[in-house]
Every structure is written in structure tokens, then in C-alpha cells.
Amino acid sequence: MSNNRQINAVIEGFVSADSATKQEQGRRFAYVLGLTPGPAGADGGIDGYGVVDGSKIYFQSKLKSSRLGAEDAGIFYSNLVRHQADIGILLAGVGYTASTPSLPNAGFQNRLLEFPNIENYRIHLLSLRDILFGDTPQWDRAVDDLPPVRQLTREAWDGFNEI
């Protein structure tokens, strides 16, 4: 099996999980990113949060099996505003929609750019490929705005959940 096929199989495992498992994975990804995981259960649209150099970080995980679209951009933006974040990190299962020749203004990023004051936020759009396998420009830029990343071990996660 090629390396790309193995990566795709791992990603497929994440995005095909049930909703409760995806939510728990989102909390675990927040932990790995050095953030405080959001609450289990109804989380109010926040999977993790933190502060770095006085900047408030908002993290959301959307592990859908399809690319996140324009409507997801609106939800992400409203949560940035609601949580008064300076930095927004969104983790998508397989990525984000893009514009097409017939719809040049369509897609997740184009919709995000339509919102007022969007330039006041530092935004990092990551996919599972970025966070699980690293070594992408998107990952490298996000890490610059995060606390030190952590390794997730069963003992560390169990200890965190006991707090």
C-alpha cells in the first residue's frame, strides 16, 4: 500500500466515526495543540482554547467526510466573534471548498474573506493531513501561533480528564 493510500485510510477512519467519537477526537486534538480542551458534551462551539502572548485562541474541529463549505465559514466566523478570539484555528476532516472557474467567488476562504474585520484575526485552516502528518506550510504557520504542542499519551489524557 502506498504512503498516500495509508494516509487516506487513517483520515477515512477519523471522518467515518460517529459524532460522539469525533467530538472526543476534537478535544484530544486541542490537547495536542497545547490548548485547553473544551467541555465534553454540548460544548457551545468550542473544542479548545488558550492564550499565547496575550492573544486568545479559539479552536474548532469539524471532522466531516466532505470539505467544509461557505456555510461552515459563517459558523466559524461567528464563533470567533462570540468567543472574542484573536487567533482562530479550524480543523477540517478533509479540507475546504475552493472557488471554481464557473464560481470564482465561491468556497470556504472566499466566504470567510467577506466578513467584516476578518483581517483582525489570525486564522489557520488545518486538515487532518496537516495535524496528523505535519510538515505542511499550514501546520508550520499554525504552530507559530500556538503554545508548545504536546504528545498525547493515555496517561496524560486520563490525568487531564481527572482535573
Image: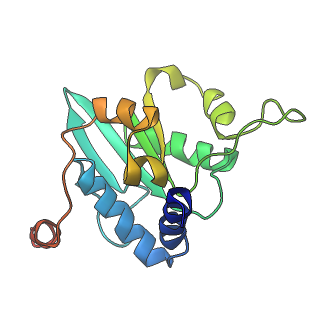
Give the x, y percent position of residue 101.
87, 32
Above or below, 17 relative to 63: below
Q: Quadrant of the N terminus?
A: bottom right
Above or below, 93 relative to 101: below
Q: Quadrant of the C terminus?
A: bottom left
Above or below, 41 relative to 67: below
Q: In this image, 162 relative to 1: left or right?
A: left
Residue at figure coordinates x 55%, y 62% from the top left: 8
Pick whichever, 138 or 22, lies toward us. 138
Residue at figure coordinates x 37%, y 67% from the top left: 25
Give the x, y percent position of residue 45.
44, 56
Above or below, 89 relative to 144: below
Residue at figure coordinates x 31%, y 52% from the top left: 48
Regarding residue 47, the answer to whether it shows in the image is yes
Regarding residue 145, the answer to whether it shows in the image is no
Q: In this image, 74 relative to 105: left or right?
A: left
Give the x, y percent position of residue 123.
45, 32
Pick whichever, 140 or 5, lies toward us. 5
Q: In this image, 112 relative to 154: left or right?
A: right
Give the x, y percent position of residue 118.
53, 25
